[in-house]
Amino acid sequence: MTNLQYNKIKVILMIMCIFALVGSGCGVNKPAESLSSRTFQDDVGRSVQIEKTDKIVALSNSFLDILHGLDAKVIGIPNTKETDLNQYFSTAEKVGFVYNINIEKVVALQPDLVIAYQGIHDKFIPILEANNIPVLVIKMKTYDEVLTKIKLLAEILNNKEKGQTLIENLTNSVATIKSKLPSQSKSIVILHSTARDVTVELESSIAGCSAQTLGLKNLANNQEALSNNPEMTPYSLEKMVAMNPEIIFVTIMGKEAELKTKMLAEMKNNPAWACLQAVKNNQVYFLEQDLFQINPGLRYPEAIATMAKLAYPEVDYGK
């Protein structure tokens, strides 16, 4: 074999060795996308590919306490009134109100992930996708949905251990409340008052779910839901009189003091209300907006405890 032939063979062997190293990954990093990209299903049936979670924008206040509990890096939040959570998100940009998000501002932040609320923010999906921004659209109304979303977000954020701790804390708190309740249930109706009208809440609403968790009997649950809102059924005073619940809960969306005054005046001035046992026994309760209009998230046990104390004030719930 001549020196020329020997050198050619040597070069060929070196090239083959290099390709073997590349193919096996030895000394060569694979692209970050193939290593870190993961796919998750959201509540509108979309497959969402998520690579990083270093910059998150939350479009609903309902997600904030869970994200804080999971140590998420949140760079954008909705405009919100002052709460204890504000200190944890003091450096986050405000991206508009929940029902009036400034999507241009969201895009400008170039987040790794946007978490949107189903039924409110679906319209932003095409805009965010066009800008290569992953968007996870989720619904979080009932207690079980809160537990499910904690698990999902913990997986996305690679913080499963913290997520499991949050879930255990919630389930233990709710179990403690339920363990103190009497075996005999009470009948209820949950009215929902806005400036426009009054409707009746079913078990899929926050208050309805809380009542169901406590074993309270929602007399409206067999009523047909509104076509545009599966959480509500139409209200009529005649139906109220026929149902005659032991307790009436009222949730308000809008100017709370004004709507409460209006409803109390209606109860006082309309004789039909006077025949209801809930009215006779002063068992009409107005529920807090913070707990029963915006999803309470990690405060769900607090919402359930609030309703329990109103329904069964004779029970010693401890501290």
Image (cartoon, rainbow, N blue to C red):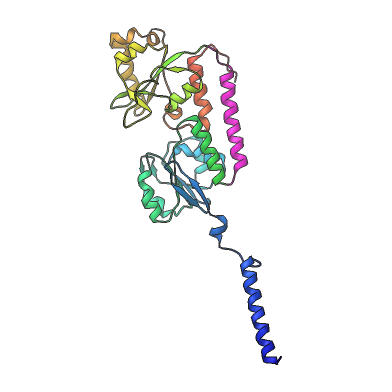
Q: Is residue 295 above or below residue 127?
A: above
The answer to which quarter of the image holds residue 202 is: top left
The answer to which quarter of the image holds residue 247 is: top left
Name the spot of residue 57 as percent of width and height, x first.
Answer: 46, 47
Residue at 46%, 36% in the rendered image: 62
Residue 104 appears in the figure: no
Could you tell me which quadrant the C terminus lies in?
Answer: top right
Prevailing secondary structure class for the magenta stretch in the rendered image? helix
Q: Is residue 95 above or below residue 14?
A: above
Residue at 62%, 69% in the rendered image: 22
- With 157 as the anchor, is 282 left or right in this view? left
Q: Is residue 26 above or below residue 307?
A: below
Could you tell me which quadrant the N terminus lies in?
Answer: bottom right
Name the spot of residue 133 as percent of width and height, x first.
Answer: 44, 53
Residue 86 appears in the figure: yes
Name the spot of residue 260 as percent of width and height, x first.
Answer: 35, 21
Number of marks drawn: 0
Outermost residue, front side: 1
Residue at 43%, 56% in the rendered image: 132
Q: Which residues are magenta?
A: 158-183
Residue 16 is one of the magenta-drawn residues: no
- With 67 as the anchor, is 267 left or right in this view? left
Name the spot of residue 277 as percent of width and height, x first.
Answer: 39, 8
